[in-house]
Amino acid sequence: MTLSPPASPTIAPRRRKPFVLLLLALFLLPVAARAALFAAEGGPTRWSDADWSSSGTLPAATAEPDARIIVFSGRTGGWKGVVAVHSWAVVKRANAKAWTRYDVVGWGTPVRVNGWAPDGRWFGHAPTVIADLRGDAAAALIPRIEAAVASYQFRHAGDYKIWPGPNSNSFIAALLRAAPELGTALPPNAIGRDFRDGFYAGLTDSRTGVEINLAGYAGAKLGWIEGIEINLLGLVVGLDLRRPAIKLPGFGRIGMDMMIPAARPPAATA
């Protein structure tokens, strides 16, 4: 008599079904709903047809004597607009006569300086303010942001990758890592913000929590600023406990607006 080797453990079909349904409900159904809304809203589908003019959010730089840092996001166009926003940063040193805007784009040299109005519409959509810091705290952080722009790892032609990154949101995430005292995080539908050049386990960008990340393809976060997040193929599901909201693919946040907090004082250097 011969004995057959024990069968490898498998997940019974009945047990797999709830898991699959949960994934569909959390990640795919919100995208489908957002796609329907996006189609109903209409709007330009070609770059040349979109409005890129100033939204009037910012005053003239000469009317703003204090140093200031603003992080903006705006919904992008075409099929990307279903699930993603584009983000950029604007800075102004004290008494400067002009704003300086930093973006990354997908053609030519990725890093662009003053390519558009500092508070410009993005693909016709008015921008949303993610963070706004003024005064001495901003003045202390601007040199760090400028240094992060100059040393950005993926600043060369050909480095840009729309998914999972490095893209425009990966760039702004890198700037936020250089200035965690801003106390903010990019919205969950800023696809590419979670890109890492390989496996990462450590502190979140705000340094108020922990994360595990597989090159932006999948990961999880738990932090005071970031809340609870699960990333699957760049789509994020989660909860914000600090400013109560749920996070869904395509929609970003549903709940209280993102807080624009006062920054923590920069750490003293020797």
Image: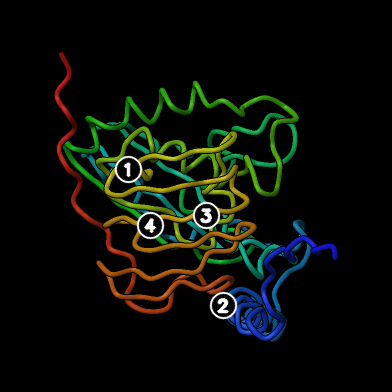
Question: Label 1: which residue?
Answer: 69
User: What crowding class fits label 1: few (fewer than 14 Cα within 10 Å), some (14-19), or many (20 or more)?
Assistant: many
Q: CA distance from mark 1 to mark 4?
A: 11 Å
Task: Identify residue type, mark 2.
Answer: Leu
Q: Earlier in the sequence, mark 3 or mark 2?
A: 2
Q: CA distance from mark 4 to mark 2?
A: 25 Å
Q: CA distance from mark 4 to mark 3?
A: 15 Å
Question: In the rendered structure, which disc, 2 or 1, sits on the residue that comes first in sequence?
Answer: 2
Residue annotated with mark 4 = 130
Q: Which numbered tag is attached to residue 120?
A: 3
Mark 1 or 4, nearer chain start = 1
The percent position of residue 131, horizontal first and vertical second, equals 33, 53
Whichever of callouts 4 and 3 sits on the residue coming sooner in the sequence is 3
Q: Nearer the viewer, residue 239 or 150?
A: 239
Q: Secondary structure at mark 1?
A: strand
Given the current orientation, which residue lies at the most extreme top position? 270
Name which residue lies at 33% across and 65% down.
258
**Residue of label 2:** 26
